[in-house]
Image (tube, rainbow, N blue to C red):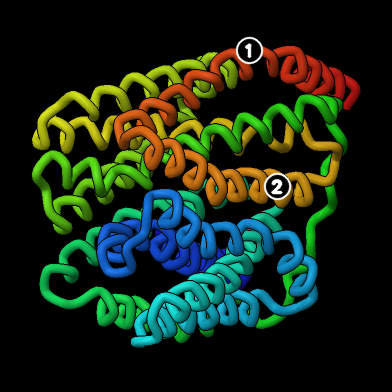
Amino acid sequence: MPTPAPTPDNTRKRRSLGGACLAHALHDGYTDGLYAFLPLWQAEFGLSYAALAMVRALYYGTMGGLQIPADRALRKVSSRAALVLSTLVAAAGLAMMALPLGFLGLCVGLLLAGVGSSIQHPRGSMLVSDTYGQDARRPLGLYNFAGDLGKAIVPAAVALLLPLLAWRPVLGLMALLGLVVAALLVPLAPATPVRPVAKRSAAPGGRGGFRLLSAIGALDTATRMGYLLFLPFLIQGLGGGSPTAGIALALLFIGGALGKATCGWLGERLGVVGGVMLTETATALLIVATLYTSLPATLVVLPLLGIVLNGTSSILYGTVPELSDGDTGRAFAVFYTSVIGAGGIAPIFYGAIADHSSQTTGLLVTAATAGVIVPLVLMLRPALQAAQAFTTRSALNG
């Protein structure tokens, strides 16, 4: 029997998903690819760990803090225009960083790139959610996986280029990649705003439950970003150079991409509380393990660490609708802002600890942060049980 021809609606859905995934892969690749430049910036500009984290926060904090305003400002703009604009602005920021404008140019470029990336996350995820409606769970998983794919590819490419070129030309090539992606988004993303689907009914998980979930997400992100801050220096301390540091980042991100799938499955089998307890305990133990292993052994451990370090977020992300007050879109925006804001601020805290003690102490504090999540997620159990009971009653009442 011949395969049925794809309907226009299915074609539109696939193109919309492809455009959102392409933009997500690029912007997440930008976000984590910048870590490979940290040792070079520290050496060139004479930065302490805390100052380096503050420079990093210019991008990360701007990206997180402007997500809700950017989403509101561009809500009536077409998905094509929003995603293309976000990519062009981020690429312009990287191009400014590539110019010989000194430390000030680097900081302004990071801010500009953060503005661009602040647009992509809410508009890309909203494009997928509104396009697929109630069937958006799996497409959103592909959208999230695309971001992790970008996190694996771009840092690896940067690691290969840095031994061959100075860091400014490498940033220039990253900006050029953004221009190419912006051109590819034009035939993919829809030219008109997608009509939002109806809001889901409110689930009484309680405001306290959602706030606790956001706090857990913030601490989980803080652990991940704190470890990423120190990882290039940890690799250097073990005898690895910039290429090895880039490979280490790629291994961690590859594990993280796998963690998005495996930990979501784990959360379904063990529940939110059991899944988070397991992943955070494993995160703390594996962070400590990388402090006391050789370089080859550390490179072996990093993909395993990436699975649990990044995989917890997939469990938490899927819990947001359960504990929202009915406005799931706004709940996701608030949750994203919380975790991204924590990711920008936390490395400054960890960096200050390392400056006043040692890199090892800073890493141990990141491991302790993962451990703190375990009792917090136990406190989340009553809210989750209330939300589950409400869902069951709603299903029985039709």
* 266 on left or right of 39: right
Q: Is 314 in front, or is 292?
A: 292
* Quadrant of the image containing the C terminus: top right
Coordinates of residue 28 in the picture (x, y in percent): 45, 59
Residue 181 visible in the displayed image: no
User: In the image, which disc is placed on residue 332?
Assistant: 2
Q: Residue at x 90, y 22 (%)?
A: 397
Q: Residue at x 81, y 26 (%)?
A: 208
Disc 1 marks a residue whose amino acid type is Leu
Residue 183 visible in the displayed image: yes
Q: Is 7 in front, or is 382?
A: 382
- Residue under numbered circle 1: 378
Residue with the most extreme front position:
356
| Label 1, residues with CA under 10 Å away: few <14, some 14-19, many ≥20 | some
Q: Is residue 104 above or below residue 311?
A: below
* Quadrant of the image containing the N terminus: bottom left
